[in-house]
Amino acid sequence: MINYIWFFLIFFGILVGLISGNGEIISKAIINSSGNTVNFIIELTGIMCFWCGVMKVAENSGLTEKISKLLKPILKRIFKEAAKDEKTLGAIVMNLTANMMGLSNAATPFGIKAMEEMDKLNKDKETASNDMALFLVLNATCIQLVPSTIISIRAACNSINPGIIILPTVMSTATAAIVGVICCKILQRYF
């Protein structure tokens, strides 16, 4: 559906530009934006490689393991069925830890594994369990301790202080995660 919306916006934008006699301006804008996009992607790739390296150091130093040890007692309290299975809980912890450290690409396989493990525990295969829904909410609203992607984008756009967003990001994502868990727990009682 989103593809249709984008096509509609681009097609009618170009059409209106051509009808209003701005074809040359549209052509220049397309060419300039293409070049700017390539430069931006190259800068962003370099910065993302740096942050992935920092996160790999954090992983090898045991920082992510320490975070996962802190998370396990909390997750055992909020996940009812998944907390009973160590393999499922381990995948959940690894997914959330990777997300907290800003490694969303590394978190994806753990998220898929966690959903597969929770599906094994699910009695009704046609409907997502409460734990599956809660995991999805936590995955989407995960607390970001190191928002490496946003910092990288800000640095690539020549921000004076790209890391200034760390504290507001931690606060807003923590709020979102808490509200998400509360809403899930309330809705679980009714649905």
Image (cartoon, rainbow, N blue to C red):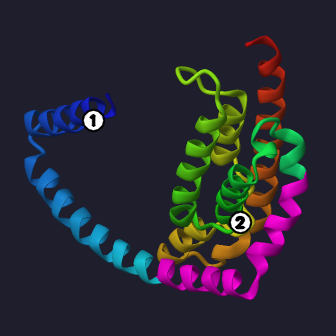
Residue at 16% from the left image edge and 35% from the top image edge: 11
Position in image of residue 115 (x %, y %): 58, 43
Marked residue nearer the N-terminal end (1 or 2): 1
Quadrant location, the C terminus: top right
Position in image of residue 15 (x %, y %): 12, 34
Rate crowding at label 2 as few (under 14), some (14 to 19) or many (20 or more) other CA atoms within 10 Å: some
How many marks the image carries: the answer is: 2
Position in image of residue 87 (x %, y %): 69, 54
Instruction: Give the residue type at disc 2.
Output: Ile
Look at the image and say whether residue 60 sits in the magenta stretch. Answer: yes
- Residue 68: quarter of image: bottom right
Seen in the picture, residue 179 relative to 76 is either above or below; the reply is above
Q: Nearer the viewer, residue 59 or 165?
A: 59
Q: Nearer the viewer, residue 82 or 108?
A: 82
Residue at 76% from the left image edge and 54% from the top image edge: 86
Residue at 81% from the left image edge and 69% from the top image edge: 67
Instruction: Give the residue type at disc 1.
Output: Asn
Question: What label does residue 3 carry, if any?
Answer: 1
Residue 126 in the figure: left or right of residue 34: right
Quadrant location, the N terminus: top left
Seen in the picture, residue 177 relative to 19 is either above or below; the reply is below
- Residue 117: quarter of image: top right
Look at the image and say whether residue 9 sits in the magenta stretch. Answer: no
- Residue span colored magenta: 47-73
- Give SS at disc 2: helix
Q: Nearer the viewer, mark 1 or mark 2?
A: 1
Q: Which residue is mark 2?
A: 165
Residue at 55% from the left image edge and 44% from the top image edge: 116
- Give SS at disc 1: helix
